Every structure is written in C-alpha cells, then in structure tokens.
Image (cartoon, helix red, strand yellow):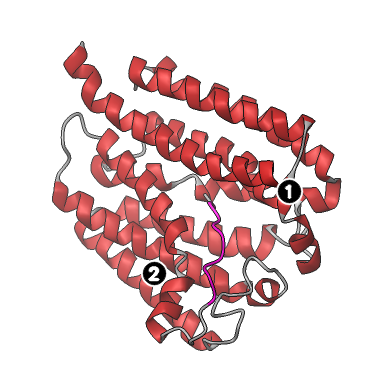
Amino acid sequence: MNPTVSSPALSSSPPSRWSQYLALTKPRVVQLIVFCAVIGMLLASPGWPDWRIVIAATAGIWLVASAAAAFNCLVEREIDRRMKRTAWRPTAKGELADRHTLAFSLLLCAIGCAILWLWVNPLTMMLTLATFVGYAIIYTVVLKPLTPQNIVIGGASGAMPPVLGWTAVRGDAGPEAWLLCLIIFLWTPPHFWALALYRAEDYARAGLPMLPVTHGAEFTRLHVFLYTIVLFAGTMLPFVYGMSGWIYLAAAIMLGAAFILYGFRLWRDYSDTLARQAFRFSILHLSLLFAALLVDHYLSPLLA
C-alpha cells in the first residue's frame, strides 16, 4: 500500500536531525500500514488477542515499514529532486548522507525483524521482511521505472499488512487474511492513479512511466473508474465468505458506491480538484472499511 500525502509546509529554520530522520519514515503512510496490520491482528482472534503479541507485532511491523520507506527515499533521491511533491525530503535536499540513510534503514529493519522473531513468530518476521524486499527493491528499484503497471504489480507488497497482522496472532495465513490482502491490492490502483492524474507533470519530469504519462489522462481515468467497480466486488467477499456480517456489508456498500461515484465523475468530468478529492477519499475509504470490519467483528456476535 502507498497512501501518499501532501508535502509539509517548509519552515524558515532548518529542520532538526531528528525531524529529518522521522521524515524518511513517511509517518502518515506507515500509520495506515500499521492500522491495517492491527486490524488483521484483532480479526484473527474470536475475542481479544494477547496484547503482548499485539504490541510486539505492531512495533516490529512499524519499524520494518519505516525502514522500507527510508530505503525508498534513498533510492529515489534523484527522482524526488525533480518532483514538487517530494523535493522537500531530506534525501532529495541532500541534508542526509546516503550512508547515514542506508544505515538508518538497515538498523530499523534489523530491530523490527528481531522483535518479530523473538516475541511474535518466525513466519510473521519472514513475511514482513519479504514485504520490505517487495516494496523497497522489487517495486522501487525494478518496477517503478520500468512499467506503467508498476503500482498494480508492486501493490502486492503494499497489500500485505493485514496478512502480517493475522499471522502474528494465528501463526498462519488463513484465507480470511488473503481476502483482506486482496481488498488492499484492488484498492491501490484507483488510489494511486487518482494522485498520478493531477501529478502527471511531476512524474513526466521525473521520467517515471506512470499510466497518465504513458497512456494519457483519459485512459487512466477510465481505469480508475473500472477499478472502483472491481474493488466494490472485492469488498463483498468478506461477507460472502462469512467472516463478516451485516454491519460490514452496509458500510462496504455505502463506501464502495461513493468511490464508484468519484471514479465515474473522474472519467466523465475530470478536474484536478476532483482528482485530489478522490485521492483523499480513497484513504478514508480504506480506513473506514477496515474499521467497519472491526466493529462488525465485535458487535455482530452481541446482536445475533
């Protein structure tokens, strides 16, 4: 998953070293990743899970996700310099040396993996590390500069947080976890392409083959709309499979219908303002959808 956020306001005074390292971890992006992982942990248990495992798994996943974000900043520092959206990053501005950024990323990854191995379970650690490799190397280094389908293929690693959370509690990745993974996988293209539509000049300047750059805005807008429909179908699967009830279904229908409406309006009556609204709504959509799963998980048995 890659819920990009707008750049922070530039300050007249130079940022502290601490704030520079913190910026490398993309805190807002990682917060959504960790949120989805925690939802996976809570859904994996019929009641309340062992909070010692939840705390350890949350810390480990947070650290490894932050490490992947920092590594991404290092690899894309030249690209970030050419994009208004990312030119403020410490690596793009040359405020942090490459060796310091790399050491910071590896340190976070090592500590996070150690926590997962020692206090959660080896499977969660290996899957989390694989997610780091998938995002930081396969997506960032290989796919992103190579193909306009980068976000579709690379979205598999970004869709893993609920699987990581599930395995942390259960010790295995059951079908329910993969349904949650599928939802995020289907959500990623319309989320990211909405951003790419109003940032197309940025991506073209950076030389990245994003879909609006290679295939044009109209083609991308149509695909955003089509993906919102496919995503809507995907969000029905937890109810069909029996892992959720009517509370989730009602929320999924309302949120999905709103996202489809955004997609349709983008396709038929595009504006940059509308694309920004659709992008921001996509983050709200995923957050509320997973929150609805959690509410349903605990309330439905009480209402039965």
Residue 70 x %, y %: 49, 71
Residue with the most extreme front position: 12
Q: Is residue 89 visible?
A: yes
Identify residue for label 2. Answer: 109
Q: Which residues make up the magenta segment?
A: 2-10
Taking the spot 70% from the left edge, 28% from the top edge, the residue there is: 264
Q: Is residue 18 magenta?
A: no
Residue 249 x %, y %: 41, 18
Q: Is residue 236 visible?
A: no
Taking the spot 62% from the left edge, 27% from the top edge, the residue there is: 260
Q: Is residue 9 magenta?
A: yes
Towards the viewer: 39 or 263: 263
- Dot 1 crowding, Cα within 10 Å, few <14, some 14–19, many 20+: many
Residue 133 left/right relative to 109: right
* Residue type pointed to by label 2: Cys
Residue 197: numbered disc? 1
Label 2: element kind: helix
Label 1: element kind: helix
Taking the spot 85% from the left edge, 46% from the top edge, the residue there is: 216
Residue 195 x %, y %: 65, 50
* Residue type pointed to by label 1: Leu
Residue 99, placed above or below residue 260: below
Residue 93, placed above or below residue 300: below
Towards the viewer: 88 or 35: 88
Taking the spot 51% from the left edge, 39% from the top edge, the residue there is: 184
Residue 164, placed above or below residue 245: below
Residue 34 x %, y %: 36, 52
